[in-house]
Image (cartoon, helix red, strand yellow):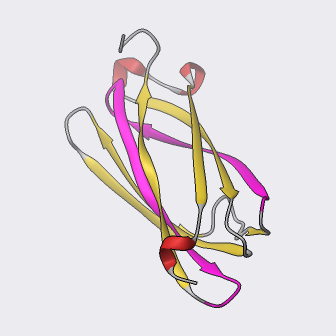
Amino acid sequence: MAVKDYDVKIDTLVHYIPEESDEDRGHYVFAYTITITNDAPVGIQLISRHWVITDANQQAQEVRGLGVVGEQPLLKPGESFRYTSGTAISTPVGTMQGEYQMVAESGEHFDVSIPEFVLSVPRVLH
C-alpha cells in the first residue's frame, strides 16, 4: 500500500484558558483537543509528533517527542483517538501546525500533516 493510501483525519478544537494565563505578563495559555481518525483499511500507530507553535510576533517554538500525552495509540480501521494538551504563547493570537509520524501494520512509516489552526483569545479575532 502506498503512503498516499493512508487516510487519517485530524480534527482540532481550541480553548483559551484565562485562569492559567497572565495577560499583563504576555502569557496566554490554550488547551487544544485533537481527534485522530483512522479511515485507512489497515491499522496504524502514532509514534511521535512534531509541532511548530508561532505567536503573532513570528516567534516560533518547535516541540518534538514520542507519542502524545504519554501514549502511542494504535488505531484499527475506523477507530479514533482523542486527547487534550496545552501550550502557551506570548501574544493573544498565534498558530499551531505540525505532523504525526505514524507506522502502518505493514511496517511502513509515513507522516500525517496536522493542518494549521489558530490560537486566539476570545474577541481578539473577528
Residue at x-position 35% and y-position 15%: 125
In the rendered structure, the answer to whether residue 68 lies left or right of residue 89 reads right
Q: Is residue 74 above or below residue 35?
A: below
Residue range (magenta)? 78-107
In the rendered structure, the answer to whether residue 101 lies left or right of residue 36 reads left
Q: Point out the image quarter for the N terminus.
A: bottom right
Using the image as rendered, state which of residue 114 and residue 61 is in the foreground: 114
Residue lying furthest left: 57
In the rendered structure, the answer to whether residue 100 lies left or right of residue 46 reads left
The answer to which image quadrant residue 74 occupies is: bottom right
Using the image as rendered, state which of residue 107 and residue 70 is in the foreground: 107
Residue at x-position 63% and y-position 91%: 107
Would residue 100 be counted in the magenta stretch?
yes
Label tally: 0
Using the image as rendered, state which of residue 65 and residue 9 is in the foreground: 9
Q: Point out the image quarter for the C terminus.
A: top left
Residue lying furthest bottom: 107
Q: Is residue 83 above or below residue 15?
A: below
Residue at x-position 49% and y-position 25%: 21
The image shows residue 65 at horizontal and vertical percentages of 52, 69
The image shows residue 96 at horizontal and vertical percentages of 40, 44
Would residue 71 be counted in the magenta stretch?
no
Q: Is residue 109 above or below residue 27?
A: below
Main secondary structure of the magenta stretch: strand
Q: Is residue 100 above or below residue 91?
A: below
The answer to which image quadrant residue 40 occupies is: bottom right
Residue at x-position 33% and y-position 33%: 90
